[in-house]
Image (cartoon, grey):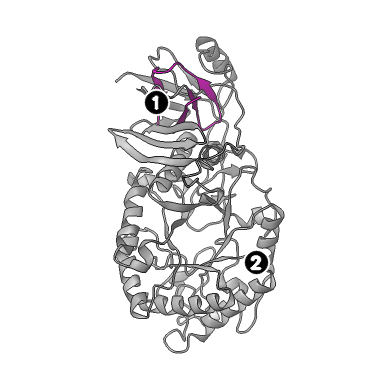
């Protein structure tokens, strides 16, 4: 199959942050303005010419890249009417885990995101159990109130609070050094000392935080029982102990607010037997033995690991693992499934900015197609993992892609799940009266500003295409277009 080469001139930088899972800094040099000028003379088929940080298709292409040009990255939400008989994609599908500095916790606060999103997860915002309950019968709600206040001031009203990190004073092994990370003290991964008897330390905290939430007018409506209980540095107790804690928390939360939603504890994949498939069935069995499952929502963490050869399409296997585990539990099998934390992980595992944009877009498209109704990206403002924004460079290509995906998908209706033909993937939507198709070629790649493409001939219904940088162009019906690792959106007019 004939192919084209796409060149992107970059001036993006990925810098460090504070999450324990993150890695080293990296930098990508900026492109040459002179080269850009020469290339723009060679190829002007795209809409409106070319500029730095935009894709430029080089001749000879049998099919030009879908969208190239100088349009700014626009992230406005489309307002077309949706089909009344279908379910549109809600803004809440696009969730963020926000870095504490975005919430003005600590020094050097970051500005609020300029790209739209619909929900906030409170994990990794310095609001864990050990922070809010630093000693027996002592509660400090300062950080929690700050997080909620800053978010509300910026129009966010949908919150999920995640339980985790046992305070050392309540831990059954308070000096356990295997629990220690940048954000977790000794003993924090071990179960509370009284979990097998009264479970009073845990119940008192859940009671206190829900009472405080009620005083604030219920700003938190969803409660996530535990962060990554299948990973030993997060939880070193048994599934039965976690089920006991889930039952106690569920009872307290529902008594405080009968309309509140409670999730399952949230496993993730970390290798060496610490994975969703090994942990979730055992936990569900333990919860059911106590009268469970004590959950309104099923949650998991959907990281992919490029350093292990994982492509974004690995998300399909991860989602299938979750749905298979709950299939035999009638009270859970019809419940919503949420991915409350995910990305490519450490930026050093996927250093190319264009491939980061590709991964993000494909992860969002595929998860909605698989029935995941929320996906919280980890982590806006973090400069080492899942990086979307830096203080010096602003939005990077992945951050721009996030805004474009929100624009493409919010209000749209999936009409045909994402499907594969060879290495080419397509996902079909309608947006009001407009037909849309997201398409990419998983065999293509990007490196150092150069993205390979292949030819794709869409249905004659499509005559316009958009890329993840916000560029648009029109083309004649039946004309082949260039597609690559980064999804493009084809639209009817």
**Could you say which disc has been placed on residue 34 in the image?**
none
Residue at 39% across, 68% down: 232
Left/right of residue 62 with respect to residue 25 in the rendered view = left
What percent of the width, then of the height, locates residue 87?
A: 47, 47
In the rendered image, which quarter contains the N terminus? top left
Over which residues does the magenta segment extend?
464-493
Above or below residue 185? Residue 369 is above
Element assignment for label 2: helix
Residue 167: in sight, yes or no?
no
Q: Which residue is mark 1?
A: 452
Q: Which residue is mark 2?
A: 144
Element assignment for label 1: strand
- The image quadrant that residue 247 belongs to is bottom left
What percent of the width, then of the height, locates residue 323?
A: 33, 58
Residue 137: in sight, yes or no?
yes
What percent of the width, then of the height, locates residue 254?
A: 53, 75
Q: Nearer the viewer, residue 45 or 165?
A: 45
Residue 490 part of the magenta segment? yes
Left/right of residue 273 with respect to residue 28 in the rendered view = left
């Amino acid at each position: 199959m004939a192919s084209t080469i796409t060149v992107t001139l970059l001036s993006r930088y990925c810098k460090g942050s504070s999450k324990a899972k993150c890695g080293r800094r990296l930098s990508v040099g900026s492109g040459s303005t002179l080269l850009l000028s020469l290339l723009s003379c060679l190829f002007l088929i795209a809409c409106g010419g070319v500029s730095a940080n935009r894709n430029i298709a080089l001749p000879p292409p049998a099919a030009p890249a879908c969208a190239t040009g100088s349009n700014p990255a626009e992230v406005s939400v489309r307002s077309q009417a949706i089909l009344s008989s279908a379910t549109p994609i809600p803004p809440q599908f696009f969730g963020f885990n926000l870095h504490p500095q975005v919430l003005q916790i600590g020094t050097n606060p970051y500005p609020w995101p300029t790209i739209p999103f619909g929900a906030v997860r409170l994990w990794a915002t310095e609001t864990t159990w050990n922070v809010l309950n630093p000693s027996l019968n002592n509660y400090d709600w300062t950080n929690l109130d700050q997080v909620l206040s800053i978010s509300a001031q910026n129009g966010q009203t949908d919150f999920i609070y995640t339980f985790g990190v046992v305070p050392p004073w309540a831990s059954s092994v308070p000096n356990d050094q295997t629990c220690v990370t940048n954000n977790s003290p000794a003993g924090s991964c071990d179960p509370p000392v009284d979990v097998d008897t009264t479970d009073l330390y845990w119940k008192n905290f859940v009671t206190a935080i829900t009472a405080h939430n009620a005083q604030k007018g219920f700003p938190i409506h969803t409660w996530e029982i535990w962060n990554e209980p299948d990973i030993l540095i997060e939880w070193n107790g048994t599934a039965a102990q976690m089920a006991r804690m889930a039952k106690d928390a569920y009872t307290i939360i529902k008594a405080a607010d009968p309309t509140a939603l409670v999730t399952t504890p949230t496993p993730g994949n970390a290798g060496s037997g610490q994975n969703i498939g090994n942990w979730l069935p055992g936990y569900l069995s333990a919860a059911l033995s106590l009268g469970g499952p004590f959950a309104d929502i099923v949650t998991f963490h959907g990281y992919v690991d490029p350093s292990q050869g994982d492509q974004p399409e690995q998300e399909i296997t991860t989602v299938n693992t979750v749905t298979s585990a709950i299939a035999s539990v009638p009270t859970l099998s019809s419940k919503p499934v949420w991915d409350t934390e995910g990305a490519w992980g450490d930026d050093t595992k996927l250093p190319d900015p264009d491939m980061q944009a590709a991964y993000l877009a494909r992860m969002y498209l595929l998860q909605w197609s698989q029935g995941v109704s929320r996906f919280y990206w980890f982590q806006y403002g973090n400069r080492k993992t899942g990086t979307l924004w830096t203080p010096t460079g602003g939005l990077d290509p992945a951050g721009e892609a996030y805004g474009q995906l929100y624009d493409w998908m919010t209000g749209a209706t999936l009409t045909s799940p994402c499907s594969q033909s060879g290495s080419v993937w397509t996902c079909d939507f309608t947006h009001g009266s407009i037909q849309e198709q997201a398409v990419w070629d998983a065999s293509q790649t990007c490196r150092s500003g150069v993205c390979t493409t292949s030819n794709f001939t869409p249905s004659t219904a499509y005559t316009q295409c958009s890329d993840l940088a916000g560029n648009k162009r029109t083309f004649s019906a039946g004309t082949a277009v260039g597609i690559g690792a980064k999804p493009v959106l084809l639209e009817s007019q």
